[in-house]
Amino acid sequence: MSLNHVRKQYGSATVLHDVSLTIHDKEFFTLLGPSGCGKTTLLRIIAGFESVTGGTVQLHGKEIAGLAANERPVNTVFQQYSLFPHMSVTDNVLFGLQMRKVPAAVARKRVNAMLELVQLEDFSHRMPSQLSGGQQQRVALARALAPEPEVLLLDEPLSALDLKLRQAMRLELKQIQEEAGITFIFVTHDQEEALTLSDRIAVMSAGAIQQVGTAHDIYESPVNRFVADFIGESNLIETHVLEYHGCRLICSLPGGGQIVTDSPAESMVASVGSSGYICVRPEKLKLLSPAAQADCVLQGVVERHIYLGTDTQLVLRLDGGQTIQLRVQNTSHTGTLPEPGSTAQVGIESGSARFLEQ
């Protein structure tokens, strides 16, 4: 599937700005971003529930932007599962096939296959009210998959579940996608969901694509400040460029030190004196002993500890006034952490810092 220069306007308000994407066959592709960024509008355009103001939507080289929703080989699972409360599980899954006038024997065989896929064969005669939230979601998936769409769209389908069930359903959803062997396009604002499920992710903000890549790409190599700040936790330390050598930059550190950083994009224009940010993840920082020597050292005052179970988060205020966070694994030596109010030194792992423009 490809979207080329897609725009969407409501009156004078532009919701999508020149969105272009290529989504591969049998890929689990996620549209990730904060509320109001345009991801659901984009999904609805693919589904046929919204028209485009400009641009094209193609599936296997065929333009589908002009087709009605029921003419597209696409199906949708919504946030609210919208199961028919007066129908059994089997009849809910069967309904769409009956509307398409699929022969009864073929339809029944397809329903059985879908219930087996979502592991609900033993619940086929139950009513939706007799099912848990996770089971209802699996019925909605089976119903959407039964007509054999080429693409399945999922609009935040896990958001109504509690945390434990949501975490379990992530694994099931990915397994179902792999076994079904079709393209899933998933919308969420939950970055952990996106990182866990996706083959690739498109990060969106203000109606535009900020970055497309694997979970590893967008976490380890964010292309701008928004992506770095939105995906996981990041320390964004103010800096300026001291030397510039292609994709490698030497940047200033608070307190007078220097660090070699990567540049996030070939298109970025940087020069000596350019201001920006050093982006480094909390787990890439290492607490140093007072006598330790390191190439890239930050010094500051410990403001507080935050116990998180597997690790402890330390918040430091640097000499320049900025605060940073680092994480220390809770092992047997955790008791040696510097107390709040004391001075601490932090080293930055080699190759873990990126320069981001202002």
Image (cartoon, grey):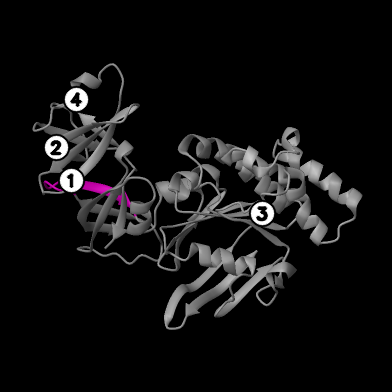
Cβ–Cβ below 8 Å for labels 1 and 2?
yes
Residue ID for mark 2: 303
Residue ID for mark 3: 183
| Picture coordinates of residue 253, whole percent (x, y) | 18, 48
Residue type, mark 3 in image: Thr
Q: Is residue 256 left or right of residue 55?
A: left
Foreground of the two, 307 or 233:
307
Q: Which mark is residue 337?
A: 4
Residue type, mark 2 in image: Glu
Comes first in the chain, label 3 or label 4: 3
Q: CA distance from mark 3 to mark 4?
A: 48 Å
Q: Is residue 342 depicted above or below 94 in this figure? A: above
For label 2, the crowd category at 10 Å Cα-Cα, with few meaning under 14, some 14 to 19 and many 20 or more, is some
Looking at the rendering, the stretch of residues picked out in magenta corresponds to: 253-262
Residue ID for mark 1: 323
**Residue 147: in sight, yes or no?**
no
For label 3, the crowd category at 10 Å Cα-Cα, with few meaning under 14, some 14 to 19 and many 20 or more, is many
